[in-house]
Image: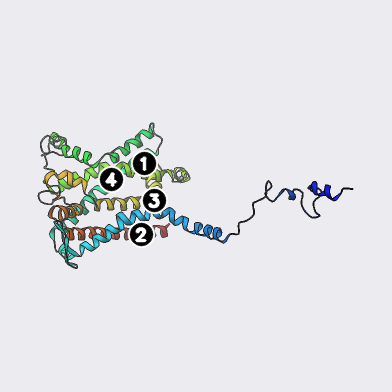
Amino acid sequence: MTSPKQALAHPASSAEAAPGSQPGAARGAHGRGTPPPEDKSPWRSRLYRWDMKASPYVFIAPFFVIFGAFSLIPLMYTAWYSLHDVQLSSLDTQTWAGLDNYQNLLSSDFFWNALKNTFTIGVISTVPQLMAAIGLAHLLNYRLRGSTVWRVVMLTPYATSVAAATLVFTLLYSWDGGMVNWLLDFVGIDPINWRESDWGSQFAVSSIVIWRWTGYNALIYLAAMQAIPADLYESAAIDGANRWQQFIHVTVPQLRPTILFTVVVSTIGATQLFGEPLLFGGVSGSKGGSEHQYQTLGLYMYDQGWIIGNLGKASAIAWSMFLILLIVAAINLLVTRRLRKSQ
């Protein structure tokens, strides 16, 4: 028998706990393996709900802030300028012009000439570029010695600056002492004045674009080729198809989405072509040659905005280029949907 004083001095152990209680319950609710009690504070639960809802938007907010500051706001400001008569020498003086700048573009021979040059240079540079890129990717897709080295070599032109590449090609296409004219003279062809001729100047500018972007597109095609299932090639080989037939009937059909993507990207790049013709022309680079024979839309916009100083018309040209790119994107969407339905 214990006295009441001894009972108060010695607390009950876990075995002497009240009936129905689990062993160790007397050690407290924060024992090992037992979760802490839920915090029923309304402020913390509300803060938790806000955190779960707002965190995704906070993570993607920097992109939209940068896009709005450096893309969306300038785009809207350019649209406002395109509806006004604004001169570079007096930016504070703006006169409402409505659609006059766009009407002047539609009635301008220089605009249609720049649009035609942009289209022809785009075709001359895009078609050989993508065909060569597919061929190079097909070669790199096989097991070659030093394949990593060849892939790095493919990216070297892309890593080269536009100014350096254009300077080298300007020397190659030089009228006096250029290697291209020297080779033409070696095979009995008269030298060509590449800067002054119509098709010659456009071919020269296109060759710079082809040299810079072929390797980049080749690596894109190579990545797509490596994703093609090997079973398709094995089935084609069992049916007796050689490598060329496998390339035509297996590789190319599987590359249709990638080819469409590169065509769209190359079209966008051709529409915005600026650095190569500007540097290739030298003094008359902004004019696209003495006769505007290779003046693109980018050069025409630069000439109107920064050389002549008519920012309203230059803004109208910029928005015309933007509308062209929207049309290209819409065509891409329609073709993509048809390809998906056909598959």
* Earlier residue among tags 2 and 4: 4
- Which circle marks residue 253 in the picture? 3
Tell me how far mark 2 sits from mark 1, CA to CA: 27 Å
- Which circle marks residue 138 in the picture? 1
The colour scheme is: rainbow
Residue 181 occupies quadrant: top left
126 sits left or right of 143 in the view: left
Per the image, label 4 sits on a secondary structure element best described as helix
* Earlier residue among tags 3 and 4: 4
Q: Nearer the viewer, residue 216 or 249?
A: 216
- Which circle marks residue 333 in the picture? 2
Q: Residue furthest right?
A: 1
Per the image, label 3 sits on a secondary structure element best described as helix
Tag 1: amino acid: His
* Earlier residue among tags 1 and 3: 1
* Earlier residue among tags 1 and 4: 4
294 sits left or right of 251 in the view: left
129 sits left or right of 24 in the view: left
Tag 4: amino acid: Gln
- Which circle marks residue 129 in the picture? 4
Tag 2: amino acid: Leu
Q: Nearer the viewer, mark 2 or mark 3?
A: 2
Percent position of residue 318, x then y: 22, 58
Q: Nearer the viewer, mark 1 or mark 4?
A: 4
Q: Residues within 10 Å of mark 2 (few under 14, many from 20)?
A: few
